[in-house]
Structure formats: structure tokens, C-alpha cells
Image: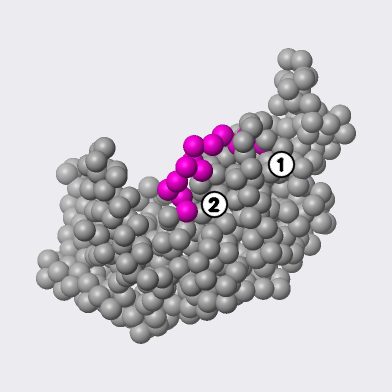
Amino acid sequence: MSERPSTIAAPSLESEAWNAALGVVESVEPSVAAAIRAELRDQRESLKLIASENYASPAVLLAMGNWLSDKYAEGTVGRRMYAGCRNVDTVERLAAEHARALFGADHAYAQPHSGIDANLVAYWAVLASRVESPRLTAMAAAHVDELDDEQWATLRHELGDQRMIGMSLGAGGHLTHGFRRNISGKMFDQRSYGTDPETGLLEYSAVRDLARSFRPLIIVAGYSAYPRLVNFATMREIADEVGAVLLVDMAHFAGLVAGGVLTGDFDPVPHAQIVTSTTHKSLRGPRGGLVLCEAALAEHVDRGCPMVLGGPLPHVMAAKAVALAEARRPEFRDYARSVVDNARALADGLLSRGARLVTGGTDNHLVLLDTTPYGLTGRQAEAALLDAGIVTNRNSIPADPNGPWYTSGVRLGTPALTTRGLGGAEMDEIADMIVAVLRATTPAPASGAGTSKAQYRLEDDVASAVASRARELLAPHPLYPSVTLE
Ligand code: PLP
């Protein structure tokens, strides 16, 4: 790898690389090359506040586009079902070593193709290691392909009876934490814990009560839309009290753990037996997943492929290794700190302009804005903001009166704009722009009676004024400044 941080590499190198690569693509399918070029233009022009997105470095992106993609490599490092995997072994080993060192984990598994896949690997690993009957444990762990039909039916039945608890969707949990629209909701009998209706904060006593009465095998902690910290030491105490495994899904906040912002009780790795993540959100890597675990679970986690995963993606594991190496650099700590400072500045800017935020603020990288005071659904607010050049996503708020489709909130996150170099003053300006748009938006009549939850009217002059402020704000912070496409 280059000695220089990839973000400040010589412009000509990266421009040459991409122009040459796109030229090759263009010679076969020009429309694909055009879509790739257009995507860079779109991303450059948008004020991206989607909490789960980021911009990977040129080194990460370039590590993915190559012939490592051509290899099959089922199995794990040194134990593959295919011959000729020595280079795949190199990149997978590196990705796992960087992950272990970065997060201080006993074991890391770099194969999951996404966060959902990482959770499935983790659930299977826990089931295989922790189902109570020793007979089932042995069956689940080692001899699945040797079982006769009756044994297989027994195994499936008994594993399927296992219990899990996780944060409710309304409080900010994720579908993979045991909800019906994901296979986890079919694998487990699930109950949710929520947040205090007054404060919006996680209620540990309610988690403890639920764990005591429901006796889950797994307690899942972690979230997609909770703007505060979770005390993982307390969650582990609760898990230990009921003999459960603590599984933390840090998909959203892995970058804050990597960057040393979440430490002590708020760092999941020393407290959870197993931790899952994505690599593309605050961690700023390629799209993908990761599982970290204590040594006792390692052999079960390493069975992820082919138990629940398709063949590994060696080119993506190469990019994970690059991204994790970047996250081990001191400048990533500054980045992570700035992500949180920016989220706080955005929250303060919104609050000072009268906005209502779930929990009244933020301690992490995201802010959950309640759109009901503006008379809008989340869907209307999301669409109006997009018209004004601000990209967000609608999100349920606790006890949401509009359900998960229309919602009553928008989720705002700072990882991407922080990568572009925007700071606190710009966050305050963005807060002003968001409030200006929401105040200038009204629900439009539905085609039948009443008002629609989707249609809206945004005053044209506000939309264009905010869009031009967005362009001005972004101009001094070019995205991929080292890349000039022909
Ligand atoms: N876990 C959490 C907490 C998430 O927020 C997400 C995605 O938003 C996932 C898992 C799934 O990640 P992926 O989209 O990579 O499958």
C-alpha cells in the first residue's frame, strides 16, 4: 500500500486510474460507464445526510475492481474447498488481522457480504454453540450434512424454538433483530424492548424485566435509528443474569468504536460475546459485513460460508483490509470525533430553531427529527428536503402514528458530510436550511377526501434558495477532489 494517506494521493494517479478503467468499461457497455460517471456527479452535488452512507476512499474503491473477484474460495483461510486460494488467503487474513487489532477482538470473520449476512452468521454460530441439549449442539455444530430426515426435522424444530430479544423497530432496532420481514423473525421467537415514552431513552430496567421473564438465548443490542449511547456493560450484566448471549450489532456505529469515541462501557467489543457490523457506514469501507467474537465462538462463526453465506467476495475482502488499515490510522480518530461533534452541532442547530428531536438530541452520529410539529409525515418531509437538495431518509419515531411506511420522522446522519470535510458552522447552516424547508412545506390534498400522507407542496422559492445554499456549502468541499473524469 502507498505510504501516503489515500485521501490526499496525487490527483493525476487516481484520475488516470478511473479514466482508464471507465474507458475499458465504455468500450463494452457505454451505458454502464455513463451511469458510473453520473453517479459521481450526483454524489458530488448532493448534501448527503443519510446516516448509513459514507464515501469510501479511492484506495478502498480501487481495491474492489480486479481479478480477485474471479476466485471461488468457500471455506476459511488455509481451509478452502477450492484450489489456488493463496492470494485470497492473504487478503482475508489481512482483513481479519486489521479488524482484530482495530477493535481488540479475539477473532474476526471478514466474509459476510452485508450487515444482514453478518447477523445471520452470528445467529447461526450462537445457535450451534448454545442450544441447550448437548445432542443438538453436536448436531448443529458438526454433523448437519450427516443427519437423516428425522434428525434434521428435530434440529430445525428445536432451533426454531429459541428465543431472542432486541430493540423494537419503533425505538430504532433493525429488521434483522428478530422481525417478521427478515428470516431472523422466523428463526427465533422474539420479544422487543423499547424506550421510555417520555424521554425516548433506552430503559435498562425494562430490558432486565423482559430478559428475566422471557429467558432469551440471545439479547441483541444495537440499532439503526437510536441517537444515544448504549451501555453494553449493563446489557452484558443482564445477559449474564439470565444465561443469554449478548450480541451487539454495531453496523451503524462501528466507525465510532474504531475511532475511539465509544470506549469503556460504550464499546461493545469487550462486553459482547459476539459483535456484528457493516463495513460501509461510519466505518467508511466497501459495502460488506464483519463478525467479531470471543475465541469460544470462532469455529462456529467461521462456518458462515456455506452455512448461510454464498461464496466469499475476495475483491471486497481486499477492500475491507484497506479500509480497516485506514481506520487504524490516527486521522481516523479525528474523523470519528468530528462525526459526533457534527451530529451534536446539527442537533443544537435544529433545537435552537424549535425542532423536536427524539430524545432531545444526540450522543452519536445521528439525529432523529420528529416531523409532526410541521404537520408532515416523514415521507413528505423526506421528499420536500430532496427537492431542496438535501438527501435524508424517513424513519419511524417511537409510537409512530403513521406506521413504518409513511413514518413521522426523518433520520439525519453526519458520517458522509464529515468525510467531505464539513464542520460545525456548516451543520448549523444545514439545520437552518432543513427547518426552512419543513416550514415551507404543507401536506397536499389526497385524490379522495382528506390530506395525503405522501403528497405535499413546497414553496418554489424556498426550494430553489435552499438548493443553491446547498451547492454553495458543498463547493469548498469537493468530493473525491483527486478525481477529474474526462
Ligand atoms: N444492522 C443494522 C443495525 C443496520 O442498520 C443495517 C442496515 O441498515 C443492517 C444491519 C444491514 O446491513 P446491510 O444493508 O449491509 O445488509
- Number of on-image labels: 2
Residue at the extreme left of the image, as rendered: 461
Which region is colored magenta? Answer: 63-75
Residue type marked 1: Gly
Q: Is residue 417 above or below residue 158?
A: below
Residue at figure coordinates x 62%, y 36% from the top left: 84
SS assignment at label 1: loop
SS assignment at label 2: helix
Q: Position of residue 177 (x, y in %)?
A: 59, 47
Residue at figure coordinates x 61%, y 64% from the top left: 202
Q: Nearer the viewer, residue 414 or 98?
A: 98
Q: Position of residue 483 (x, y in %)?
A: 31, 64
Q: Nearer the viewer, residue 49 or 23?
A: 23
How did the renderer colour the structure? one colour
Q: Position of residue 62 (x, y in %)?
A: 43, 55
Residue at figure coordinates x 35%, y 84% from the top left: 425
- Which residue was labeled with disc 1? 78
Residue 328, quarter of picture: bottom right
Closer to the chain start, of discs 1 and 2, is 1
Q: Nearer the viewer, residue 485 or 101?
A: 485
Q: Is mark 2 within 8 Å of ligand 1?
A: no
Residue at the extreme right of the image, as rendered: 134
Q: Is residue 129 magenta?
A: no
Residue 127, quarter of picture: top right
Residue type marked 2: Ala
Q: Is mark 1 within 8 Å of ligand 1?
A: no
Residue 332 visible within the image: yes
Residue at figure coordinates x 54%, y 36% from the top left: 71
Say left or right for 306 vs 128. Answer: left
Q: Nearer the viewer, residue 310 or 82?
A: 82
Badge 2 crowding class, 10 Å Cα cut-off, few under 14, some 14 to 19, many 20 or more, is many
- Disc on res. 318: 2
